[in-house]
Image: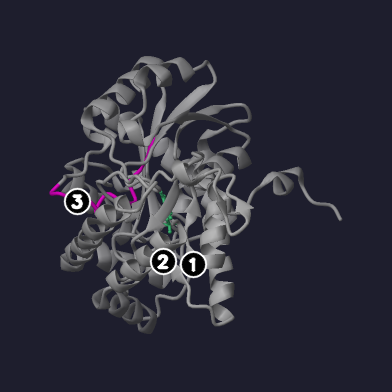
Amino acid sequence: MKISQRARELTPSPTLAMDSRAKALAAEGVDIISFAVGEPDFPTPPNVVEAACTAIHAGQTKYTPASGIPQLKQAIVAATERDLGLQYDPAQVCVCNGGKHALMNIWQSLVDPGDEVIVFAPYWVSYPPQIELCGGRVVVIATGAESDFQPDLEGVRAAVTDRTIAILINSPSNPAGAIFTRATLRGLVDLAEERNLLIISDEIYKHILFDGREHLSPAQLGADAQARTILADGVAKTYAMTGWRIGWLIAPPEIAKRAGDIQSQETSNPCTPAQYAALEALSGPQESVEEMRAEFERRRDYLVPALNEIPGVTCNTPGGAFYVYPDITAHLGRKLDGEVIGGSLELCEYLLDTAHISTVPGSAFGTEGYLRISFATSMEKLQEGVRRLTEALK
Ligand SMILES: Cc1ncc(COP(=O)(O)O)c(C=O)c1O
């Protein structure tokens, strides 16, 4: 059967694959503790659900402008000013079918075959395939726990070529919960200014920050930095709205327009009632954001020391998001249950099969020797999961 080269070369999302494997076992009646999911375990706040219902009853069930309703664009601009102190014009906003789709629209608008994008590992699983689907080349810069996942700026400089078009930043990050320091961001912005590069800043976790931190966006580092930064964001993680599929990009007007044009041919507008829900999420009461954030922090404060108690596991303290990314190198090469654990994938499989805990291997994020554990699950499940993990790694 004819299958395109593009489709053949694509690897499906490993996080979703791990999750569905765990769900299949759970459907067979196995008591699985899922540490693999990347979505808040809280319900969508009731005022947001209500807004969607009201919109549906009011007949907001038809097409809207492809790049989103004007009220939502306005609310996105207002929320960005509130959160980052930055001003944008609604014409710079394109509302998309989730943050993932916002990123895809960005690559579709920018990348020509052979163009290079600098991506830091560990990276979110969808970055390389998205860029490659557009014909781009991903230039990976590795970072590790020893530098708290900050890149070596000289290494980044050396990786820039005449084909480099952009540097991709994700702070706080998935999978490490790492936050780029002001010095790191400054260095990257300086390099972008010097080599005339764009910065793509995926800020989807910017409201989930710990220890009293405030979010710092590369766009906040001056007028030039703002002008060359494209923001990608969404309601999924902040408002427990993963299934509503609303995200957005904020870009120079020319790029925002191109992204909207592409979207008009690919999907048309994002789901209309969901746009009204996102409007309420951004402009309604914000208390639930803090409640969820505080609960994530409480779980992190339990999980990090508990993991560090397990022999051969070393875990940095994430500054944000809802993942920890422990180093499990000490367990690689061991023989467990008669099988040699060659890499993080084998370790994940072993943990799923024997301890019934689902995690995601570091190899999926471009760094071997780690596991991603999501703490978007209850404290009881975290405690039981840690007990099983400790037992399985004995
Ligand atoms: C780093 C990062 N960016 C973007 C997204 C996309 O989120 P959504 O498409 O659900 O809005 C995710 C979701 O897991 C993510 O982890």
Q: Where is residue 336 shown, x and y percent of the image?
A: 56, 55
Mark 3 — residue? Answer: 210
Mark 1 — residue? Answer: 355
Observer-nearest of 319 and 107: 319
Q: Which mark is residue 34?
A: none
Q: Amino acid at mark 2?
A: Arg
Q: Is residue 146 magenta?
A: no
**Residue found at x 54% / y 66%:** 354
| Quadrant showing the C terminus | bottom left
Check the image and report above or below for 198 versus 358.
above
Observer-nearest of 212 and 138: 212
Ligand 1 within 8 Å of the CB at mark 2: no
Colouring convention used in this rendered image of the protein: one colour
Which element carries disc 2, helix, strand or loop?
helix
Res. 19 in view = no
Q: Earlier in the sequence, mark 1 or mark 2?
A: 1
Observer-nearest of 98 and 64: 98
Mark 2 — residue? Answer: 388
Q: Amino acid at mark 3?
A: Phe
Q: CA distance from mark 2 to mark 3?
A: 27 Å
Label pair 1/3, CB-CB below 8 angstroms: no
